[in-house]
Image (tube, grey):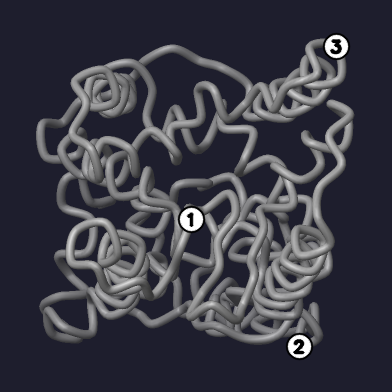
Amino acid sequence: MANLPQHAGREAVRTKGWLRAHKWLILRRISQLGILAAFMAGPWLGLWIVKGNLASSLTLDVLPLTDPYILLQALVSGVSPETTAFVGAAIVLVFYSLVGGRVYCSWVCPVNLVTDTAGWLRRKLGIRGGSQTSRSTRYWILAMTLVLSAITGTIVWELVNPVTITLRALLFGTALAWMLVLGVFLFDLFVTHDGWCGHYCPVGAFYSLLNTWAPLRVTAAKREACDDCMDCFNVCPEPQVIRPALKGADKGVGPVILANQCTNCGRCIDVCAKEVFRFGSRFSNDPKTGVDNVKQIQAIGS
């Protein structure tokens, strides 16, 4: 019998131990909180490790990093960025093209802490259902932000960007910023599961485009061991990406999750008691992986 959503990962804790069943989640939190700490160390402690924000920053007065989505909006709005902005954007583009664009969403973005908490509480409270919106909506919003930037001559998205607003709330504690962060939390809790990141966020939509050819991938390398507990589907922020790789053995589909919406968060690896998933390469995608074992299981069952 499939586990209820609020019980996802319980069997993994029993078989692997709590630490291994939360390994990638813990590493993600260390990454997210460490990045936040680096940004806040300057204003709070006078220790300027990083100057700026996630849109544009300078690390240790040496390394420029620029959000290419912000840079693109600036360009279409008619702004002429400095050379360092292009250099910073090139560095970011190369990095995320290698590790997967949506790694930004699961390992860097502070809003993920808010939406993950809402998703966890939603499972604990057994809240189901909600509004049904196409996941392609985020791409329409992405296009709209670029059009509006071109029309208005401003970087439109930065006016309402929850990432920027979350940092502003942490640094300055403004009531309006905290209200907007709370709004995202309540939306994901009561309206739509993984609503903001999975359906509406144009930042995630942009970075997913960088995910198309990234070598680093999650793979269902032991998919023949799957017992259909559904834990991976229950915790995945983009569950639609799992099925082709997990269940496609008899259809000639390889075990690597190639969908560009995958965030490489590693939660499917954590919660799987059968250790079906692991990080691997997009180039290790032999469609025959698991086929022979699946056929043997089917033969025994018949």
Name the amino acid, label 3.
Ile
x%, y% of residue 217? 64, 75
Residue situated furthest front in the rendering: 46
Pick whichever of labels 3 and 1 is earlier in the sequence. Answer: 1
Query: Label 2: which residue?
Result: 284
Circle 3 sits in a helix, a strand or a loop, which is it?
helix
Query: Label 1: which residue?
Result: 52
Task: Determine the residue positioned at 64% across, 70% down.
Answer: 64
Task: Determine the residue positioned at 51% across, 47% down.
Answer: 239
Circle 1 sits in a helix, a strand or a loop, which is it?
strand
The alpha-carbon separation of the residues under discs 2 and 3 comes to 45 Å
Q: Find out whether the residues at labels 2 and 1 contact each other: C-beta distance under 8 Å.
A: no
x%, y% of residue 280? 62, 86
Of badges 2 and 1, the one in the foreground is 1
The alpha-carbon separation of the residues under discs 3 and 1 comes to 27 Å
Name the amino acid, label 2.
Ser
- For mark 2, does the 10 Å Cα neighbourhood hold few (<14), some (14 to 19), or many (20 or more) residues? some
Against 114, residue 245 (above or below) is below
- Does residue 107 appear in this view? yes
Query: Label 3: which residue?
Result: 151
- For mark 1, does the 10 Å Cα neighbourhood hold few (<14), some (14 to 19), or many (20 or more) residues? some
